[in-house]
Image (spheres, rainbow, N blue to C red):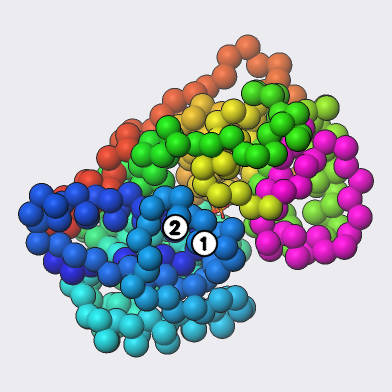
Amino acid sequence: MKITIVAGARPNFIKIAPIINAIEKKKSAGANVSYRLVHTGQHYDKNLSDTFFEELNIPKPHANLEVKSGSQAEQTAAIMIAFEKELIQNPSDLVLVVGDVNSTMACAIVSKKLNTKVAHVEAGIRSGDMTMPEEINRIVTDSITDYFFTTSETASENLKKYGVDINDIHFVGNVMIDTLYQNQSRFEQPAFWNDFNLEEKNYIVLTLHRPANVDEVDSLVNLLQGIDRLANGKKIIFPIHPRTKSILGEKKLEVENICMIEPQGYLNFMYLVKKSFAVITDSGGLSEETTVLGIPCFTMRNNTERPETITVGTNNLVGTSVKNLEKIYSEFLNAESRKCGIPQLWDGKASERIIDILLSH
Ligand code: UDP
């Protein structure tokens, strides 16, 4: 079986690493499987791309479509045009897409129109929020997918409600957590640890990049200043996403606790998360990682496509206002007990299950 694996953005790289490992393992054991890795070039900054390939030992892509930035339509169209040529020149039995970025949807559409089967890893998750580009990408991708690999029973149920045949839905667990387990022993203290006088469990990690939080500069400044106050002297380590950085521009930020740093590589970033007191974020992936590491997480969104991080894990949905964050954070500080569990099948073996299923069909 020849599989084309597509990856375009930071969270995609983290998700494909264990899938490639699982394929290599099967190949060494004599299975008839090979892959071609296509990087669409959606993320191209060294900090968001190359670093992840190096740290997670992902082989150099066989092709890089180099689409770079653009509006939603420009980027999606550019990926489709380039990927159509790629897949015609290098046909495969199956195209495997992960997550919910523009590359996921664009390459799924192209594959299906070239009569190539599509596997979607992280299928079926839904926020119900149609203002998020990711939600549209999820719905479109899942409407033409052949193999649906899900991270939760809720995601599988969502697909059933959409009329997907239950034989095509495979609840396998979470590949992002495979990467976490495979690399946990390599998490590495960042060089700035001592410069910032960081102490275990005494600082907060902050990431923000979703349009609802960062697209309007004055609200962003207001939000950051509110988070700064809430920290009550704890340092806040804020690896700033290029998108957020460019919106903030030259705007003056009066903050005492927030330390702005460049986006971190996976090994330094996960070290910071693992040793933190809490995480404030609008990232979906991070709410999954904090759940597995047992780190309290406050998600600055009104909804989540990953409800198990709340019902089972450490995540708290706080909306996008500082006031609500302050309220929920202070309730958390005063709480007598804290929930902390790991969702079913988030055990580091999702990628092996995926490859086993694909090879048995
Ligand atoms: N991440 C990282 N360095 C950083 C920030 C994030 O390695 O400075 C990793 C982390 O594992 C996180 C993932 O990137 O779960 C996803 O990032 P992003 O917020 O871009 O994607 P989302 O989860 O929102 O789709």
User: Where's residue 349, x and y in %?
Assistant: 27, 40
Q: Is residue 146 left or right of residue 186?
A: left
The residue wearing badge 1 is 49
Image position, residue 109 (x, y; %): 36, 77
Task: Identify the image quadrant of residue 46.
Answer: bottom right
Q: Are marks 1 and 2 in contact (CB under 8 Å)?
A: yes
**Mark 1: is the Cβ under 8 angstroms from ligand 1?**
no
The residue lying at 75 percent from left, 65 percent from top is 246
The reply to whether residue 167 is visible in this rendering is no
As drawn, 358 above or below 93 = above
**What's the residue type where badge 1 is placed?**
Ser
Name the residue that disc number 2 marks.
Answer: 53
| 132 on left or right of 149 | right
Magenta range is 235-261
| Residue, far top | 336
Q: Please count the marks in the image.
A: 2
Residue 172 in the image, given as x and y percentages of width and height: 27, 45
